[in-house]
Image: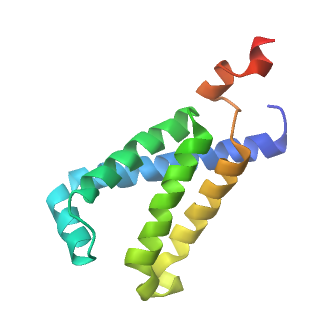
Amino acid sequence: MRSYSSTGTFIIRVILGVIFLAHGLDKFQSGIGNIEGFFASLGIPAFMATFVAIIEIVGGIALIIGLGTRIASLVLGVVLIVAIFQAKLGMGFLNGYELDIALLAMAVHLALSGSSLLSVDSLFSKKNRA
């Protein structure tokens, strides 16, 4: 392990990936129709429920294995921002959007710093080829 900082970022990457993977899978397992209804009640087109679930699954896997960490984090950050403003803001901070803010902070950190420790991306980096 190169440093405590890279180890901490690795942990953030994997945990954020697991959380998003679990949320995406749950959308399908609990019945995507239910999620579509919830989206529609918020004024979001119902088909976006499937789109968001796929983004969460693919993005979660990408983070876990460290493939396109910055891009995956950016896309998942956008999902979180929309969730906060469309679904959670009216619920207040506690029991509302506090978890989303924490996840967004994790995603922003990864989007800005990347995470090369134990990642697929590191296999293709110029540093490792030299």
**Residue nearer the viewer, 73 or 9:** 73
In the image, residue 49 above or below residue 129: below
Where does the image place residue 52, in percent across and percent down from the top left?
A: 34, 54
Where does the image place residue 54, in percent across and percent down from the top left?
A: 33, 46
On the question of residue 35 being in view, the answer is: yes
Q: Residue at x 22, y 51 (%)?
A: 29
Q: Single out the residue that lies furthest toward the left.
A: 33
In the rendered image, which quarter is residue 65 located in? Answer: top right
In the image, residue 61 above or below residue 91: above
Q: Is residue 108 left or right of residue 5?
A: left
Where does the image place residue 101, in percent across and percent down from the top left?
A: 57, 70
On the question of residue 31 being in view, the answer is: no
Quadrant location of the N terminus in the rendered image: top right
Q: Residue at x 71, y 22 (%)?
A: 125
Q: Single out the residue that lies furthest toward the right.
A: 3
Where does the image place residue 74, in percent across and percent down from the top left?
A: 56, 51
